[in-house]
Structures are given as C-alpha cells and as structure tokens.
Image (cartoon, rainbow, N blue to C red):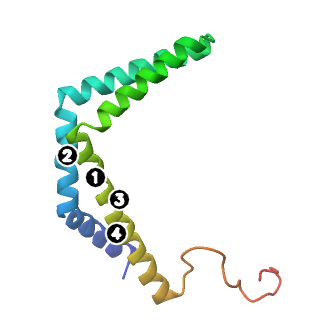
Amino acid sequence: MSRHAILSEARNFAALLERSAEVKRFRDAERQVNQSDAVQQTIASIKRKQKELVHAKHYQKPEYSRLLEQELEKLNGHLNHLPIVREYQQAQVEVNGLLQTIQQVIADTVSQKIDVETGGETASGCGGGACSCR
C-alpha cells in the first residue's frame, strides 16, 4: 500500500471518527459552552483576575495577590460546577479515552505486524558491528 493510500485511509478513518457518538457529544457540549453567556462572562472574569494577579505579583503586593487568588479560586469553582461545563469536561474525557484507545490499538497492531517497539527501552539494536549499538 502506498503512502498516498495510507493517508487517504487515515482521512477516511478521521471522517468516521468525527461521526462517532463521543465526538458528536463533545462538539455539542463545546458549542453550548461557547454560546453560554454565563460561561463566557465567567471566563472573561477569570482572565481579568489572572492579569491583575500577574501585575500584583510583579509589583510585589502580597496581600492583594492573596485576595486575587481567592477570587480566582471562587470563579474557577463556579465555572467548574456549571452543568454545561461539567458536561463538556466529561465529553472531553470520553473523546480523549477513545483517541488513546485507538492509538494503542494502532500501535499494538503495527508492533505485531512489523516488530516495532511501542515504548520503553529497545530490546536490541542492529546486532553489533561498526556502530557499536546493543
């Protein structure tokens, strides 16, 4: 099989993956998060507080820094407890799990077919000779 054919098959597989239930759920959750005024306002507040915190630390204002850190902790807690954010995070975990499983299946299959190492130390080199590998 040529390189072009392999890449074509990979594109076909990517299109198939895009239609999976996990990816559809992730895309839906992502769209909801992006369209939510509450989420976007909270994210904007977090970004503002983070910038303020950088400035407070730069100008060595430890008390103000602690106050900003507490406010950031509250804002992040609020964000992470919003139902649509939790749905998004769960969908992201599921897609990542699916991708890791696919990667492992491909690595295992290729490793079995052509004796490729999939991790850890290489068992042996070329067998010695001028290059001195082992």
Earlier in the chain: of badge 1 and badge 3, it is 1
Q: Nearer the viewer, mark 2 or mark 1?
A: 1
Q: Where is residue 37 in the image (x, y as percent from the top left)?
A: 18, 26
Give the structural element (helix, strand or loop) at label 1: helix
Q: Position of residue 42 (x, y in %)?
A: 29, 25
Residue 88 relative to residue 32: left or right: right
Q: Do the residues labelled 2 and 3 touch (CB within 8 Å)?
A: no
> Disc 1 designates what residue?
90
- Local crowd at mark 3 within 10 Å, few (<14), some, or many (≥20)? some
Q: Indicate whether 129 appears above or below 118.
A: below
> Disc 3 designates what residue?
96
Give the structural element (helix, strand or loop) at label 3: helix
Q: Distance between the residues labelled 1 and 3?
A: 10 Å
Q: Distance between the residues labelled 2 and 1?
A: 9 Å
> Disc 4 designates what residue?
7
Q: Which residue is drawn at 21% across and 63% down?
A: 15
Q: Indicate whether 82 appears above or below 13.
A: above
Give the structural element (helix, strand or loop) at label 4: helix
Q: How far apart are marks 2 and 4 (CA)?
A: 30 Å
Earlier in the chain: of badge 2 and badge 3, it is 2
> Disc 2 designates what residue?
29
> Which amino acid type corresponds to the residue marked 4 in the rendered image?
Leu
Q: Distance between the residues labelled 2 and 3?
A: 15 Å
Q: Which of marks 2 and 4 is in front?
A: 2
Please state which of residues 14 and 30 is positioned toward the viewer in this rendering.
30
> Which amino acid type corresponds to the residue marked 3 in the rendered image?
Asn
> Which amino acid type corresponds to the residue marked 1 in the rendered image?
Gln
